[in-house]
Amino acid sequence: MNEMKCFKAYDIRGIVPTELNESFAYDLGRAYASEFQPKNVVLGHDIRESSLMLYLSLMNGLLDSGVDVILLGLCGTEEVSYQTSALKTDGGIMVTASHNPMDYNGMKLSLKDSAPLGQDTGLWRLKDRMMQQQFSALTFDGKTTEYDDKSAYIQHLLSYVDLTKIKPIKVVANTGNGCASLALEQLIPHLPIEWIKMNYEPNGSFPNGIPNPLLPENRLSTSQAVIKHQADFGLAWDGDNDRCFFFDHEGNFIEGYYLMGLVAQQMLMKYPQSKVVMDTRLTWNTEAIAHQYQGEAIMSKGGHSYIKQTMREADAVYGAEMSGHHYFKAFAYCDSGMIPWLLIAELLSNSDRSLKSLVEESIQAFPCSGELNFKVSDSDEVLRYLENYFVEDQPVKQTLDGLTLIFPEWRFNVRASNTEPLLRLNIETRGDIALLKEKQTLLEQLIHLYVIE
């Protein structure tokens, strides 16, 4: 516990109760109050069975430090982001471990205007305070306000599209027994969409498995439902509703990389000559679309605090990570699991094309491997080995986030995960699927020299 291993680069995640417990959450509230001196803070929690306990302890740490707390209760991460900015509070904290395993939990923290709190912006100062027990004097005079008015939040989500142009379509919605249904249920009356609902009731025991659609084994039920009901497309969310994932009308899972391009296209059509931000893993398709629509694509280190910070610095209208996070300037530069599918529904309605046909061109132009994960003995050693292996080919090297090597017809990025003990590999080519398979096989063989069971 004293090592505070749960502090990550841009949030807090750890195993309950050995790394996260009531005492940790209470001290975090006190540390946050001592470091940033907020007058008021928005607080929310996800559906995990340990979340309410951590939420209440965090609340008490803030209250005892004299901070007023606005309680959203059970909600998605994006609602904490929205309300922190909309209610003009001094900060916001969401208790969630997103897609991590059952025994994990965590916190995502922000400051005024929903500015991200990460390693470089104060998160580790909280760690130091907690380790040294350096807290301001207790006052016990903080007050709570329960806030359950979602009307402004829902209207803001709807403002991203022209509701009159959305046609009647059929959509499968697999909310994974997480928080997404709380927002979705309030959006449904405003839209001419027929919904096929799956795993819809929030349930912290996750009876249908942890909602993480990035895992291939978690996609089959959504895919089958799309085919069975002849839906126009399918959606699946992670547990805290800050990511949504798409399936075309044939039940095919669509890589987040290509969705990033479609959403970037929509945003650049609405806001011409704007900037969009992308993470370093896969970039060529996003760069091509930004160029096509007279925009500019800017790279950022991956992770929500880094993407948000880069967007603020560049005044970008949109940002995304291929892991399914989509960020919007008008949404306090934060990520939403609802805005992307609204934009895609509008795009499909206006184009009279299927989602599959809209992404096929990009898939053919820039085929990619999808993210490949490896548990290795030493991530830094793998990166050094790969760099040395290809040195004679004289690739362009980037080290913004992990190692990126760029060749004339292909590129790859390999980086250590900030949230899991994994090394992540992504590869793309310029339209050459055979080359993609060849390089994927090679890189897998090289990395497997360091793989541990």
Image (tube, helix red, strand yellow):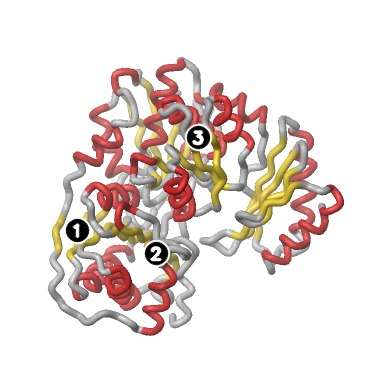
Closest to the observer: 133 or 179? Answer: 133
Other-residue count near label 3 (Cα within 10 Å), few / some / many at <14 / 14–19 / ≥20: many
Marks 2 and 1: CB-CB under 8 Å? no
Is 36 rendered above or below residue 200?
Answer: below
How far apart are the two marked residues, 2 and 3, measured between alpha carbons? 30 Å
The picture quadrant where one finds residue 123 is bottom left
Label 2 and label 1: CA atoms lie apart by 19 Å
Placement of the C terminus among the 4 image quadrants: bottom right
Q: Nearer the viewer, mark 2 or mark 3?
A: 2
Q: CA distance from mark 1 to mark 3?
A: 39 Å
Q: Dot 3: what SS?
A: helix
Can you tell which of label 2 and label 1 is closer to the viewer? 1
Q: Which residue is mark 2?
A: 106
What residue does disc 3 label? 223
Residue under circle 1?
70
Where residue 379 sits: x, y (%)? 67, 64
| Of callouts 2 and 1, the N-terminal one | 1
Q: Quadrant of residue 348?
A: top left
At label 1, which amino acid type do we have? Ile
Q: Position of residue 9 (x, y in %)?
A: 49, 63
Closer to the camera: disc 1 or disc 3?
1
Q: Is residue 145 above or below residue 378?
A: above
Residue furthest toward the top?
Answer: 352
